[in-house]
Image: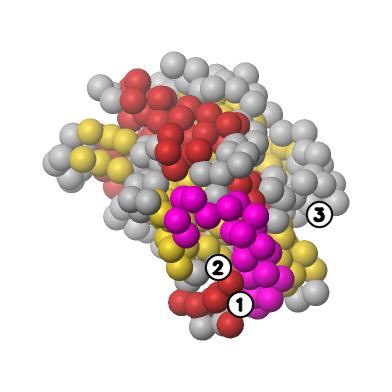
Amino acid sequence: MTVRYARAPSQPFLALFQDGGLLHALTEPLACIVAGHPVWLDLQFRKSDEAMLYCGQTRLLVVTMQQDSVRVDAHQTYRKQSASAYIRGSWPFATPGAAFSQGLRAYLEQIEVAPRWTRSEGAVQSRWMQNDPAIKADLPWRSIDREAVLTYAGDALSSASPTTVQMQNANSAVSLLASSEAWSQPSIRDEANELDQIAISNDGQQLVLIELKPRDGAKAFYAPLQLARYALEWATALTGPDRGTTVADVNAVAGAQRKIGLGRATSNLSSSPTVRPIIGFNDPPTREVLRRISLVWATIANLVAHSLILPPEVWAWPDGDQPRKLLALNRHLTKGKKNPP
């Protein structure tokens, strides 16, 4: 089985985003107006030479490489709007970049985005991606991707694999904790879905895995259980036979962003990094939520232990303020111990 994080663009596709290329306008600071306020957009590369332009939690554009052109499309919600006529369709590589830029700006000026996509989780996602040019955040990492996934080629993960067994044990332990504490049960998935963001620490020594939660999000205190699956999956990839490929894949995405001026990653990932799980909020959660987060981690810490996985941290990034660490969880917390911020 081969593990890949295959989101780096090919050189021909990347060239279209560089200065003078057809798609260069997508690398500039872009915003659309939602409920009377500007929302800064976020460009991300995807597998198979595809790129997506996000507004909060919604995708405004999908750009896909073709033989001699790029296909530009939108979610069906936006296809129905007249503004989509400015940008949708096939754009030959030889098209002047100014023509694409003009169509893009007309589309963004007239598109109507429902406010629900840029509130709550959408607002948290945008802030932590640092796509607003006015943000000067002092974070020890820079995010390089959102909705990140590892893909597997060959045999599917065995139900008896160490990662699967660890997560089954962790899920069972948290279910028992929820019962003993009279909490609602967690929503337990059999498989990992998309991690909110991945990042590289400023010194390149840590792969940072970020699960984002709005302060008022229901069951946000179960975030350590979500993060544990992602952390185990990435740690396994970074210690398995494909570890060199995984590091190279991450660095290829970071390098592509730097090459077109997005510059989110300050360093390449080390050849032997550790994994740092982060739970990120907008406003600081209540003391009770922090207590529950600590209890959940204390319950599963030994069950999901891995030599590369560092204890999670809880951060908050209030509107108009700097991000700050609220809590550093410990590997050996005692169940029931309170951990005030």
Q: Is residue 160 left or right of residue 99?
A: left
Which of the marked residues, 3 or 2, is nearer the chain's N terminus?
2
Q: Does residue 105 appear in the picture of this structure?
A: yes
Considering only vertical position in the picture, is 126 above or below 238? Answer: below
In magenta stretch: residue 141: no
Q: CA distance from mark 3 to mark 1?
A: 31 Å
Work out whether residue 236 or residue 3 is closer to the camera in this orientation and state it.
Answer: 3
Q: Do residues under tags 2 and 1 come within 8 Å of each other at their CB atoms?
A: yes
In x, y percent, where is residue 71?
42, 60
Where, by quadrant of the figure, is residue 250 drawn? top left
Q: Quadrant of the N terminus?
A: top left
Task: Characterize the local packing of mark 1: few (<14), some (14-19) or many (20 or more) Cα atoms within 10 angstroms.
Answer: some
Q: CA distance from mark 3 to mark 2?
A: 33 Å
Q: Which residue is mark 2?
A: 87
Q: Which residue is mark 1?
A: 83
Type of amino acid at the residue the image marks with label 1: Ala
**Residues in magenta?**
91-112
